[in-house]
Amino acid sequence: MPFDLQPNLKGELIRLRPLKPEDWDDLFAVASDALIWEQHPESDRYKEDVFGVFFQDALESGGAFVVIDNDNQQIIGSTRFYGYDPEKSEIEIGWTFLARKYWGGRHNQEMKRLMLAHAFKFWRTWCFTSERRTSARKGRWKRSARSRLEWRRGRTEITRRLAT
């Protein structure tokens, strides 16, 4: 069975559905908050022309989602599957942003949990890489964690930390 890059995924707090061209207004309303991008390497992504490139790339990727809050049915951000390589059985999750109101809460955790659960229907093992900013002024990023994830007993477990 081939991997579905854009399934409809639903959790308790949010749902993910494929990004569509008609989502521009609502998604740009979220993305136009300059503070979302303040520490991002592309810190001017809040500008309409810069976000337009991001949005078009997301549409063309075939793996982008909008994130919708189940309580108010509003678009609160975006994420995507990308880097799909069926020969290597590899896929990545990223390009994620959420409205600041949803930072530090359970929404991002649920989003990743939904995406991982979907991916683990197709593969048993994943390599997870996390990056963090090491210098706000110089915009440098460092790989801060790399772990092997496995689907065991119906849940995701970190089975081994890998060298970074």
Image (cartoon, grey):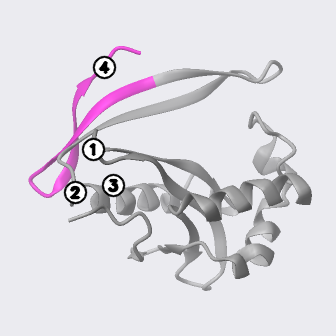
User: Residue 49, how many percent across, how many down?
Assistant: 90, 57
| Structural distance between the alpha carbons of marks 2 and 3 | 10 Å
Residue position marked by numbered label 1 in the rendering: 89
Instruction: Please provide the residue range marked out in magenta.
Output: 145-164
Q: Is residue 146 magenta?
A: yes
Which of disc 3 and disc 2 is earlier in sequence?
Answer: 3
Residue position marked by numbered label 4 in the rendering: 162
**Which residue is at 65% across, 69% downward?**
76
Residue 47 visible to the viewer:
no
Q: Three-letter amino acid code at disc 4?
A: Leu
Which of disc 4 and disc 1 is earlier in sequence?
Answer: 1
Q: Nearer the viewer, mark 2 or mark 1?
A: 1
Task: State left or right for residue 72 relative to residue 154.
Answer: right
Which of disc 4 and disc 2 is earlier in sequence?
Answer: 2
| Structural distance between the alpha carbons of marks 3 and 1 | 14 Å
User: Residue 138, how many percent across, how many down?
Assistant: 80, 18
Label 1's element? loop
**Quarter assignment of residue 103:** bottom right
Q: Three-letter amino acid code at disc 2?
A: Phe
Do the residues bearing badges 2 and 1 touch, measured as CB atoms within 8 Å?
yes
Residue 4 got which mark? none
Quarter of the picture holding the C terminus: top left
User: Residue 35, how many percent across, how many down?
Assistant: 82, 48
Residue position marked by numbered label 2 in the rendering: 122
Residue position marked by numbered label 3 in the rendering: 116
User: Residue 79, how many percent across, how many down?
Assistant: 56, 58
Residue 6 visible to the viewer:
yes
Which of disc 1 and disc 3 is earlier in sequence?
Answer: 1
**Which residue is at 14% across, 58% downward?**
154
Circle 4 residues within 10 Å: few <14, some 14–19, many ≥20:
few
**Which residue is at 76% across, 50% downward?**
36
Q: Three-letter amino acid code at disc 1?
A: Ser
